[in-house]
Every structure is written in structure tokens, then in C-alpha cells.
Amino acid sequence: MKITALAGGVGGAKLAHGLAQILAPEDLTIIVNTGDDFEHLGMYICPDLDTVCYTLGGLANPETGWGRVGESWNTISNVEKLGGPAWFRLGDQDIATHLERTRRLKEGQSLSQITKDFCKAWGIQHTVLPMSDSPVRTMVDSEEGELAFQEYFVHRQCAPKVKGFRFDGVEAAEPVVGAKEAIDRADAVVICPSNPWVSIDPILRVIKKIDKPVLAVSPIIGGKTVKGPAAKMYEELGIEPSSLAVARHYRTILTGFVLDNADSAMENEIKNLNVKTLVTDTLMNHLTDRTRLAKDVLHFIGSL
């Protein structure tokens, strides 16, 4: 079975890692959101892309899900001591990633080629693609004005009430070479349990059209997200956060939907959207959970 996964953030990275434990490198491609990329301290930073790669490479901090395991903080601590901006906490190992990426980008190399080289250095055999080599920037329309995503997410800690989202540059952005081909070769596209508004929507806007069965895994369990502001965003946009809300979000492209046991009461309503469902345990606290959920997803795809 060949799968193309769409991912962003910690939840998306975990399921992508689970799929990578089962599928051969030639059978799994992961397309990652780059709408939250930004420049900071003179470096080009790709938070979602790095989270996915660190997770696949066994380098991610297991306590946070982001950043590097065994990290040290000497550089950012000294930046702060000197009066520089330290609100985006960059570890020393992580800074090396951003420095080398920035150097190569300034030489004219593409983000997709750099990502390929980094994956090789980190021992990642599965294909990881940024959604586009062109910049797309997620902008948050809030009651305090429009904010760049990292300003909203990290600096302001998601405090401003959201009103909507804009993806600057998305109309001109094209998928990276290999992304559409991976979708065309795939038996199905899996939307990992990532934030629908700011992790998956940018990818879908760049890809534009998917002519394959699409299965999504809900990032919301019992009205809450394990990590991130997705549930808060739904509430502030006047939508009750739930697995049903996520299914409705994707309903125009959805073939199958995976929801947690805690939300089993919503299964019939989701089926009424003309979507097939799987109810299972979607919480991924341990590596074994990631593999188990990935197996459930693949078995479900086989039954569609």
C-alpha cells in the first residue's frame, strides 16, 4: 500500500512516525506544512518541517514533541542576556539546523533539496517534502489585528481571539516537485491529526486538487486537543470543537474519518456526511501507540 500523508505539528509528526514504522520508504511520502516558516535572528526557521524530521529521525524531545532531545540552551540564553529577542526558544542543536538551512537558501538551493539532504544526514529513509519551495505565510486575523503566525502562536501564546486566517503567497505557490506525483501514485492520502486551520489548510490550498481517497484522523478528542490551539480556534470562530467539526471541515474531500473512542457518539452524524468511519484509540502517548494507530489507519484504508 502506498500512502501520502499530510502533516504539521506534533500530532501529525507522531502519526507520520507510526506510518514510517510499517511502510517501506518507497511506499510513504510525507508532505509538510511550511505556512508557519519565518525568519528570526537572521535564520530561516521551519517549525513543522523540523518537528516532522526530528521525530522521524528519533531526534525529537520526547517530553515536548518539538525541538531536539538532549538539547542545551547556551546560545539563546546569551542572546537574552545581551538584550536580544528570546521569546522563540531555540536550542543549540536546533540552531545548527537553521544556520545551515539559511546558508544554503542564500546560495540559491531550494528548501526541498535542503530537506532531502538533511533527511539523509539524519538517517531518514522515507521521503519528506515541504509543501512548496515558494514562501507561504500564515497570517492570523485576530481581535488585536493581523498577526504573523509565530507572533500569535509563540510570542503571544495564542491569547488573541482569532477571527480568521490568511495564507500570504498561497495563490502563487506551486507544490514541490514530487508532491503531486506522490499523490498520484498513492492508494490514499492520510491527513494526520494536525490543526485543520493552520497546518493542513495551507497544504490543501497549495495542492489544490486530490483525486484519491482521503482519510483524516481527528486531532480533537472529547472537545479538546492534546497539543495546540485548534479547539480554541474552533470556539472563537463560533464552531463547537469536536471530531464532527473536523469531519465537516474536510467534508468536500473526505472518504474516511478516524475518531477517538471518546467521541463514538458522533459516529452516526459523521456517517451522515457520506463519510465512512473508524472509531479507535487515537491518543499517541508512546511509540507503540503511534504504530498501533498507523496499523488501524492502514487496515481501515484497505476496507474502504
Image: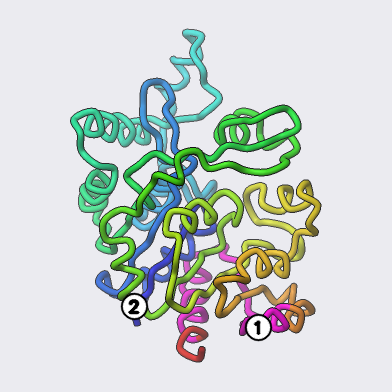
Q: How many labels does the image show?
A: 2
Residue 44: horizontal and vertical position, in percent? 36, 31
Return the residue found at the far top: 82
- Using the image, tell me which numbered label, if any, was put on residue 274: 1
Residue 289 is inside the magenta segment = yes
Percent position (x, y) of residue 156? 66, 29
Q: How crowded is mark 2: few (under 14 residues within 10 Å), some or many (20 or more)?
A: some
Which labelled disc corresponds to residue 2? 2
In the rendered image of this protein, does residue 256 appear above or below residue 128? below
Q: Residue 120 or 211: which is nearer the viewer?
A: 211
x 60%, y 67%: residue: 250
Residue 74 position, x and y percent, is: 41, 22
For numbered disc 1, what is the local secondary structure? loop
Q: Which residue is drawn at 49% across and 13% down?
A: 84
Q: Which stretch did the figure color magenta?
A: 270-299
Packing grade of label 1 (10 A; few <14, some 14-19, many >=20) is few
Type of amino acid under label 1: Asn
* 214 versus 220 height, above or below: below
Q: Check if residue 303 falls in the magenta segment.
A: no
Taking the spot 37% from the left edge, 30% from the top edge, the residue there is 92
Residue appearing at x 29%, y 64% in the figure: 126
Between disc 2 and disc 1, whose residue precedes?
A: 2
Secondary structure found at label 2: loop
